[in-house]
Every structure is written in C-alpha cells, then in structure tokens.
Amino acid sequence: MPLAFSSILAQGARARPNRRLRISEKGRSFRDGVLQRSETGLHRLENRALNDNSVPPSPRRRVKVTLRGMDLLRNPMLNKGTAFSAEERQLFGLEGLLPVRSKNQKQQAERIYAQLKDQPDDLQKYVMLTALLNRNVHLFYRVLADHLEELIPIVYTPTVGTAVQRFSRVFQGGGGVWITPDMKGRMADVLANATRRREIRLLVVTDNESILGLGDQGAGGMAISVGKLALYTAAAGIHPLQALPVSLDFGTDNEELLADDQYLGWPTRRLRGAEYMELVDEFVEAVAAVMPKALIQWEDFRKDNALRILDRFVDRVPSFNDDIQGTGAVVVAGLNGALKIKRETMAEQRIVIFGAGAAGLGVARQIRAQLAEEGLGHDECVARIAVLDRHGLLVDDGRIMDPYKRELTWPAELAASHGLSDRHARGLHDVVRKYRPTILIGVSGVGGAFTEEIVREMAAHVERPVIFPSSNPISSCEANPADLFAWTGGRCLVAAGSPFPDVEWQGKRFKIGQGNNVFIFPGLGLGALASRARRITNGMTTVASKTLAREVTDAERDAGLLFPPIGRLRSVSYSIAVAVARQAVADGVAEIREEDVEAEVRAAMWTPEYPEYEPA
Ligand code: NAD
C-alpha cells in the first residue's frame, strides 16, 4: 500500500485549534506540527547531515508541544515512541503508555532494521515501512537515511510497482489527494481540505497513465507520488508536511481495474481531449490559488500529455516533468562523466538514442542544449543525434505527425548521406553500422535490444564506446553491463538505469553507476524551493546535470562509476540544490540574494533527529 502520508496530514488537519497544539522555537513557530512563516517570510528548518558530513550541521531543536498522552503518541510527526525520555513521559502524560525503558533513536532504528531483515519479501518490507511512517515520521526517515541504498528499491522502484498494482487490494487508509472529475468547479476547496494549517511547497502529481513500465494503473498511481516525496525528504530534506502527493484520477483504461469490484478509483474510462485538459487547467489554477508557493513535479503521464502539460504550464507555475527533464539531466551527467574519461567533448560525438518517448526526448533536448553551448549550430546539433522509435530511425519523410517526434527527426537528406534512406532498413543495427555512433543510449523499455551483434559492431569503430542501457526495470534493460564488457573487450563506459552488480574484468572489479533520476529531482526541487523560484528554467536543469557530473570523485571514476554511489545522495542533492538556487538567481527567477543561497538551502532542509520537547 502507498506510504500513507495522508494519514499524517489528516492527523495534522484533524488537530483543531482548541486542542492548543502549538510548537515553537527560536525565531520560528510551528502550529499543529507545521512550520509557520517567520518574520522574514522564510521557512527555517534545522539542517543536519544524516550520514555524511558534507552538509553543514546546525544545533539541535527544542520545541514546545501542547499535545499530551495518546494524542501525542498518535501524532506521527511528533511521536517518538520508546524514545520519549523519562522526563518527557512525566511532562506529557505518557507514563504507563509505553514500555518502561527508553531507547534512543539509533537503538530504535537498529530494532526496526532487524525487523525489516526478517520480512519474507520486499512488499512486506514496504508494508512495514509504511506502517512505521504512519506512526513515527522521524524514525521512518532515520531508517531510510541510514540504509538509503538498500531501501530506495523498497520505498520506490521496483517494489513500489507491486504496491501500485495491488493498491485497491491492500489499501489501509489515505495517501494524499485524489482529484476526480466530479470535483470540477470546486478543486480549490478540495485542495484546501488537504492543506489546512500547513503550507504546501511541493506537489508530485501523476495522472497514473504511464506508471513505471506498468502503464495505466488508475488511482493506485498515488503510490508513485508518495514514494517520490519520500525520496525528496530522504535525499534533500524537504519537510514531510510541506509535501503533497496528488493523483489526478480522471478514470482508467485498465480493463482489469474497471472490472474489479474492489477498485477504489474513478470507475470509468479515462477522460481525454478538451475535457481532460479543462480539469488539468482547473487543478493548476487551484494550486496557484491555494498553494501559491508550491512547486509541481509532473510524474508518469503518458508522453503526449506529459509534453503538452509541461509546455502549457512551465511559465505559469514553477513546474517540471521528471520523466523528461530529470531523465535528460541525469543521463547527460553520466555522459559528461564518460567524456571526461575519454577527454572528448559532446560536440565530437555521434549519439544514438534508442527510444523516442518522454525519456528519449528529454535526453535529446539536454544533449542539444550542451551542443549549442559548445558552439554547434542547429544543423550540426541535429546531425549529432540519431533517434529511433519502434519503426526505426526518425526521418522527416512526411510520415511523422507527432510534433514532439518531429523535433527529433533527421532531414531526409541527412539520412541519405549516411545511406539510411530506405525506411525498411533503418533499424538499430543498420544505424549503428552506417552512422557509427560513439554513444548509445537505451530508453526504449525493450529488454536485450542491444544485442551482441550490435554492440560488437559499435565497438569495431570506437575505442571507448559509451553505452547506457537506461531502461527500467532490469527485465526492460537493453543490455546487461557484464555482457557489454565481454562484447567490447572491456573498453565500454557503462551506466545503467537499474542497479547492477559489479563486473569483474581481467582481474579488476568495476562498479556500474546507476543513472537514476533520484540524483536530480531532489536537489533540483530543493534548489527551486530554497530560492523561491518562480519557474524552472533550462539553466536550472542544466546546472543540476553539470553539478551531478562533477560530484563523481576521481576514485569513483577509477572504479568505473559514472554516477556517485546512492549512499552519497544527500550531499549530492545539497550541492545540486545550491547550484540550482544560484542559477535561479542568475536567471532572474529567484526571490533571494546570491549571497544567501547556501544559508537558504541549509535552512530549507529538514532532518529526522527528534527535537527536544517542552510543554508550551
Ligand atoms: P515511453 O513509452 O514514453 O517511450 C518509449 C519509447 O520507446 C517510444 O518512443 C517507443 O516507440 C520506443 N520503443 C518501444 N519499442 C521499441 C522498439 N522495439 N524499438 C525501438 N523503440 C521502441 O517511455 P519513457 O517514459 O520514455 O521511458 C522509456 C524507458 O526509459 C522506460 O523503460 C523507463 O524505465 C526508462 N527510463 C529510465 C530513466 C532513468 O533514470 N534511468 C528515466 C526515465 C525513463
């Protein structure tokens, strides 16, 4: 089931003013466990490193609390469980409500981790972590931070995929906000229901149609939004109460769900066309009215809607599409790592992108931005990137109607100049043979598409072929990194979309970097929020990509990594956030000063250490 943030939210919202829950600390105030604005208009959240010391620390918080007894234990944002000290138990009416011995957060986290290890499978681990999140937010994020590399595949892909599919079967309560067609005309009121007494700064919004590799998953897509927000908090310290997961539940075309009596979503076919866009328009207007400082991350929309929505709202509200821009930024960061090893520029490459969907477009756009920066003109940029879809190389021969695909096509003359005029002979093998790419990127979702024959062909013409089989999950990955080493005689530079084990090659062990968007969106989002960016500029995504590339150390590169290890995610996200916020200032879309950037980013980061409580 989805990580039920909404239960936390619901509990926050349920706390009425007459319960007098008010928490405050120097220069800041919280109400109902929610930070209120300080006089400078900024949210000031503590900032301490989780499992690395590259994010500067700040002093421990002391907060005033008026909740007592079971009310306190049942508030997941305030509950410390067995970590309440003897003194706090006395002060807050908790005596007898907990086992007698207090444990600190580290001991609690060790106990939870041992319990996790005992779970029979990943879905059960997911369910257990969900339950933990619903009763103790700090402890959930402590455990996640301590075992980030191990637990990201549980709270997010691939395990979250199973949770999405089983959503209506295992539903245990809330999970964010579902917007349905019957809310037309009242969406602002509906959003206001979900946001009482807290300021939402970040929404992850999906319409559930293109979930991971699973397609249309109806209302269950909520688990994706929830999982992404968990990563935002774990990786970039976004305060859990500032984040809102949203599912635009405008129906589903998933026959199985429609036929299922237990299905919990809007039980009709998907709305399309003008009807669909009117609802999205109203949703965005409602967000702008009810949460004027919120950033929207669009997530897992079908490609045509993803592109239309991104373009439609990019100048109206701070927003970005992770599947397009996040993927572009992460893949290009990995490419730049490889180019550093090759001591070459992007402009010197011939690049093949296999897959012309949202990810392929995002990667192509980001590469083109770099090519232009390196001084190439339009035609040269076009000639450097060949994009293929299921019908082969995209060539502008009058057949391609999709405007976004047209953006990726080669002119017919260019195809002819490479001997690729025959549309029946423009498959991947043909293109590799005739165009001789130096870089091959897989974003097709076609498992095993980079065959031995194709890879050997590529390697015959390039000293260090760069090959990124980026599709997820592992079964959809275009090639296994170990095979790529074997087929290229160990000359390839590889990063994959999914985690892969190290590769042993001629007595040396190589690590395989994971080109996962999780390296980009938390830092990009944090930088945008900390700088209070009015929009996400191309410069901001580009600088996120460049900063990620720079974060790989020489030692990591020597070990084969083109991305940092996931264990360093928190400090990487911090560096990206600082760079993004600076870029927002430079692009004139920020509301902070350049000299305040680092302080603003640090101040915007929440950490899961328990504050000390004293009665209000
Ligand atoms: P999409 O459905 O929008 O696009 C898929 C594209 O692949 C389409 O253009 C389709 O024509 C093409 N395709 C399908 N079968 C093909 C074939 N046999 N030959 C050539 N092309 C074919 O999906 P998307 O959102 O672009 O995602 C594509 C893949 O990229 C997924 O597997 C996804 O997991 C992966 N992805 C990875 C990352 C990452 O960070 N590593 C990020 C985003 C997406």
Image: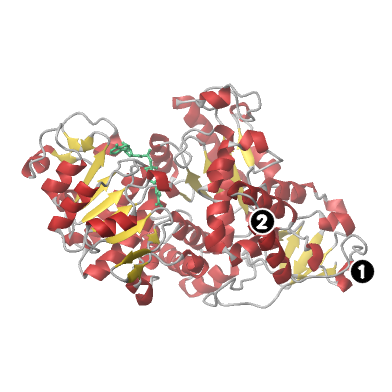
Question: Where residue 67 appears, x then y in whole percent?
Answer: 85, 59
Residue beneath the point at 62% across and 26% down: 182
- Residue kind at label 1, given as amino acid type: Gln
Residue beneath the point at 82% across and 49% down: 16
Compared with residue 414, is residue 44 higher up or lower down, i.e. above or below? below
**Mark 2 falls on what kind of element?**
loop
Q: Is residue 259 left or right of residue 489?
A: right
In space, the residues marked 1 and 2 are separated at their CA atoms by: 34 Å
- Residue 90: give its label: 1
- Residue kind at label 2, given as amino acid type: Asp
The quarter of the image that holds ligand 1 is top left
The answer to whether any part of residue 168 appears in the image is yes
- Ligand 1 within 8 A of label 2's CB? no
The answer to whether any part of residue 187 appears in the image is no
Quadrant occupied by the C terminus: bottom right
Question: Where residue 40 appears, x then y in whole percent?
Answer: 63, 67
Quadrant occupied by the N terminus: top right
Question: Where residue 335 appears, x then y in whole percent?
Answer: 29, 61
Residue beneath the point at 19% across and 38% down: 427
The residue wearing badge 2 is 118
**Mark 1 falls on what kind of element?**
helix
Compared with residue 127, is residue 566 higher up or lower down, i.e. above or below? below
How crowded pointer 1 is (Cα within 10 Å; few <14, some 14-19, many 20+) is rated as: few
Q: From the viewer's side, name the closer residue of 237 and 296.
A: 237
Q: Is residue 167 left or right of residue 343?
A: right
